[in-house]
Amino acid sequence: MKVIKKKIIYRIIVIVLLIGLACLGIYLKQVKDYKQTVENMTFKKINISAIADGTYVGECNVNIISAKVEVTVKSGKISNINLLEHKNERGKTAEKVIDKVLNKQKVDVDAVSGATNSSKVIKKAIENALIKG
């Protein structure tokens, strides 16, 4: 009876370890894919003065990081950007990129140091909103 219990316990341990390894493998693949997506992200040059006045919503989701913004264009300029959602790893400081976009009146501004990936995701969400205009 004790031998049977030990075998069952060992099998359960092996199964739990295999499930844990599978989950780890899936997570590492997601991290690799997200990093590659962010690394390959490019930004279009947008003529903001040609965008009709209005408020536009844009999103960008690369699984681990995502952002949703509301961009207001008035008189050919970006007058306001509201960050509606920002799921980030350690990229809270990236939200400062919004001020850079407002000041420079373009999307392709320098990323916030230490929060490059989140900065890129926020900028892409802004770009996606402007493209809708």
Image (cartoon, rainbow, N blue to C red):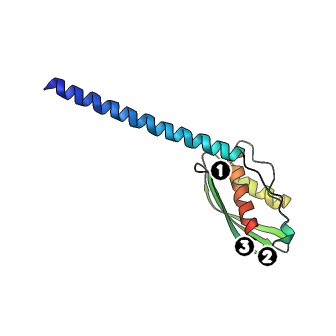
Q: In the rendered structure, which amino acid carries the disc numbered 3?
A: Thr
Q: In the rendered structure, which amino acid carries the disc numbered 1?
A: Lys
Q: Position of residue 99 (x, y in %)?
A: 77, 58
Helix, strand or loop under label 1: helix
Instruction: Say if 114 sits above or below 65 in the image.
Output: above
Q: Residue at x 17, y 23 (%)?
A: 3
Identify the residue position indicated by label 2 in the image: 53
Classify residue 21 by image quadrant. top left
Cα distance between the residues tagged 1 and 3: 24 Å
Q: Position of residue 8 (x, y in %)?
A: 23, 30
Instruction: Say if 70 sits above or below 40 in the image.
Output: below
Closest to the camera, between mark 1 and mark 3, is 3
Residue 92 badge: 1
Identify the residue position indicated by label 3 in the image: 55
Mark 1 or mark 3: name the one nearer the start of the chain. 3
Mark 2 or mark 1: name the one nearer the start of the chain. 2
Do labels 1 and 3 touch, CB within 8 Å? Answer: no
Q: Residue at x 71, y 62 (%)?
A: 128
Do labels 3 and 2 touch, CB within 8 Å? Answer: no
Quadrant location of the C terminus in the rendered image: bottom right
Instruction: Say if 25 sits above or below 101 in the image.
Output: above
* In-front residue for pair 66/84: 66
